[in-house]
Amino acid sequence: MDKYYMGIDVGSVSTNIILMDEEKKVHYKKYFRTQGKPIEILKEGINNLVEEIGEVEILGVGATGSGRYLANIIVGADIVKNEITAHAVAGLNFNPHIRTIIEIGGQDSKIVIIRDGIVVDFAMNTVCAAGTGSFLDRQAARLGIDISDFGSLALKSKSPVRIAGRCAVFAESDMIHKQQLGHNQYDIAKGLCDALVRNYLSNVGKGKEILEPILFQGGVAANIGIKKAFEEALNMDVIVPDNYDVMGAIGAAILAQEEMKNKRKTNFRGFEILNMDYKVKGFECNGCSNKCEVVEIREKDKVLARYGDKCGKWSSLIGDNSIKLA
Amino acid sequence: MSIKVGIPRGMFYFDYYFLWKNFFNNLGVDVITSPKTNKDILNKGVELCVDEACLPIKIYHGHVDYLKDKVDYIFIPKMTSIHKKEYCCPKHIGLPDMIKNNIRNLPPLIDTEINLKKSHKNIKSSVFHIGKHFKKNSKTIAEAFQKAYRQYQEYIEMTTSKIIPIDINTKYKELSYITNVKKENYGRRIMVLGHSYNIYDYYINMDLISKLNKRRFDVVTAEMVKENRSREYAARLPKRMFWTHGQRIVGSAFALIEEKSISGIVYVSAFGCGLDSVLIDLIERKAKENRIPFTLLTLDEQTGEAGINTRVEAFIDMLEWRNRDEIDLSTHG
Amino acid sequence: MKLTFPHMGNVYIAAKAFFEELGQEVIPPPRNSKKTLEIGTKYAQETICLPLKIMIGNFVESIERGADTILLTGSCGPCRFGYYSVLENNILKDMGYRVRFIVLDPIGEGVDKLKKNVYQLFNAQNIKDVLEAAKIGWQLIKKADYITDLSNRKRAYAINSYEVDLIMDNYFKEVEKTFGAKEMMELMDSTIDKLNRVKIKQNFSPIRIGLIGEIYTVIEPFVNLELERKLGHMGVLVEKSLTPTIWVEHHVKAFPFGSKLERLKHELAKPYLKTAVGGHGLETVGSAIYYAQKGFDGAIQLLPLNCMPEIVAKSILPNVSKDYSFPIMTLIIDEMTGEAGYMTRIEAFMDLIKRKRRTVANG
């Protein structure tokens, strides 16, 4: 039976699962929409995996992304890491000389600055969505363009329009305005790419020393219009790795491989999880005026996890304190 | 029944509660505070306050609203200046005016101006103005304040002798801003910077200090650096820092950066904070020059704890990664 | 020394002529444009207020034209403006520019430093030279403001309001070609002459709006998206609560007591806001009441995103509005160049005011 490490990245927009061998070669990768039901998607993802390559031996599991703790509860992970570290690990594995990682996903964007193979600085977008994938998705829909054509359309632009992009709401109303003025789709598409890049550089990238080689990863890296806009704005080359869309999951798998060097048995709960029935229940705690919304995950009669309470009254009830969801 | 004065648990509470409370008590007045910030207080504050204001100002509105039916007076001094030739934030100065215009059916406010811009002696007239509500004799008022001030100085002594202000709960129960902090020495420390009302209100910052302690880091804050030391370092800025909070935050940061006694800096800032937009820039530059890692947590009422956790965890990973690498290098070399 | 300074409405017109007259080489920045703003947002920290961003753009564009010295007025709190010079110096250093800053800080920061700076700038040997120079400067400022006011008045009353724009655009173009105070005065006089010849409507009483709020956004037309012109074309008479003239009268001419007008506004604001809160927060509240009492139809508050003093003022204005039954709208000014949403708000506000006028007239 083939032996693999599994990497899982549960984000708010997408859930990615990969399998990687001892040589860190990726054998399986799958991308799912999280659609606000991460548990079902995780089960579906594992199911998909079994159907495609049959049952394999899992040597270790790494979980990352904003839903990393949930992935840990459902699948059983050997290491649970934040997505910034996971992305850096994967980027360094792709090219050990890398000095900058630009990562733009569905709901958030990051920059990681690396020197001599060490993360020395990083930043994430603050409260604004104007520099993320979902912003582009929405605007593409508004323009009636398929998101996968968006980049190539932008490349055809000869005189891009300027779209104010500091805030998604402003950018959207400005784009509609420009549309009404009769600008063509190419120029508006390019204008949006430029706005996203400008916003990224002046928000996430502000004050960061961006040096080559630069890696561009995350779902938005598929968009050649954005890649081009980055290259123009920075006047530098930008590299998009083959597995740009699952770098977080790859990083998690690599971290799991490292973790397993000092461990004998993986925490992976096995492929049986497919047949398990998870019940999720939410309730409002009336213990104090915080009125926390507590979520409880049960497998049959066993409470797997409780989270959402600020004081720890519920989450600490189930013995294992380490399972605490954000 | 004695008179009750309400002190909202927000803004300057975290700096001066102790001074004020003792002053009022010494005058024979009961002091009532609002509870620690919670969801109801936050929601109420967001509802009452203008949208453009920063999170701590909104939360303060919630605290005032909580107290308004429970006390005879609410104490919201107009904090114009707390040091000679220096200022507080414009929103601190306008705070009682904002409250009066935003909240209906308030009990009488004690909104005496504290303005030490021209001279520190001006505190006297402010103290009398406040005390006059309760006692006629100016000597009684002065004595009540002097006694409170001595108690307050004891507290300042303690914070600067390496006890996190929030750790003092064992001695002064009412100052237990955060209760679940262990006092332990991990031998490595992170500086948590920002306005006192952001770093000691654990609802606002989602209990950042506990998160750092859990990852085995000691925490040092601006309040723990002696004032004269902060001022000495702040004086190195090319222009006189005219905000007292700026003096404290920038000066303490510069001091610890230059003596290289911290592994990193986490700056907690409320979205839209005007002072922070200046202070962060100055500190981040200094940290960069001295290769001290720096990260910024920006908070508003929509901030999710997941995002904060990711940032904090990634920051600590980065510190440990660096550290490990340095050890590796030395063993190889 | 090749001197430049940030744009702030029409101040550059007076400043250019004034310093040329004193024998300084002056390189005013090109008029504010999208490019100015783009440079500013790219290099300034994201969270800082808008005026700093525009200023960075101004400085870079001036330096590219050869300027090596930047003149800036200072302050010492509590508004962020007081720390601009330090932040700006850092940003320009990051970009690799080496320039000198001359910051005119208030007298409280040291008389000698201010004196030294002023003497150098004014090419003055003694106090007499300084006063002599100041007189010319004052004349220029007053006249430049007079032209701005006149153009606003004419625009509201003009049969063809765009005629005013043509005259003003031409004036701005000609400004760059003049040298020294004499030529500038001549240009100003001929512009006034042209404005006075614009044909105006008879028996017309325009809506009167007071523009209140943060000084930079009130004075600088690029930043407030040419609000004066927009309102003027709608037949609205605009009066600004703050102009360079008002500022100089209050801070320099009547120092240290302050001008009568500003003191009046402070008094008016007192029941709502007891003390100054930095910037022009107190003036904003006072001006709103001042315009209400003078029978204006409404006021528009300009608030650059995150401006601390104006946020305090904004909290208070709804009560002023209610007590005086005086419509006040707040426009938050950010770096968005999209005008659609902005125009919608202004038009809706004007409709509201017109409706109010009709009900009052009928009722």
Image (tube, coloured by chain):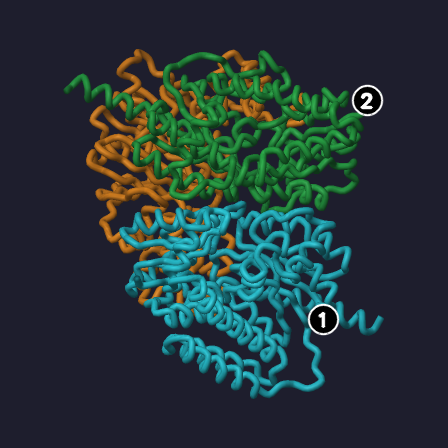
**Image quadrant in which you'd find residue A60:** top left
Give the class, few, some or many, for how many residues have Cα within 10 Å of label 1's Cα (few <14, many ≥20): some
In front of the other: A250 or C307? C307
- Residue holding disc 2: B2
In front of the other: B202 or C123? C123
Give the class, few, some or many, for how many residues have Cα within 10 Å of label 2's Cα (few <14, many ≥20): few
- Picture coordinates of residue C118 (x, y %)? 41, 59
- Provide the secondary structure element on which disc 1 rests: helix
**What residue is rendered at 27% in x and 42% in y?**
A215
Q: Are marks 1 and 2 in contact (CB under 8 Å)?
A: no
Q: Which quadrant is home to the N terminus of chain A? A: top left
Which chain is disc 1 placed on? C
Amino acid type of the residue that numbered disc 2 sits on in the rendered structure: Ser
Q: Which chain is cyan in the picture? A: C
- Picture coordinates of residue B72 (x, y %)? 79, 30
**What residue is rendered at 50% in x and 26% in y?**
B223
Which chain is disc 2 placed on? B
**What residue is rendered at 53% in x and 81% in y?**
C164
In front of the other: C81 or C119? C119
Amino acid type of the residue that numbered disc 1 sits on in the rendered structure: Lys
Tell me if residue A99 can be seen.
Answer: yes
- Provide the secondary structure element on which disc 2 rests: loop
- Residue holding disc 1: C354
Q: What colour has chain A?
A: orange
Tell me if residue A195 can be seen.
Answer: no
Q: What colour has chain B?
A: green
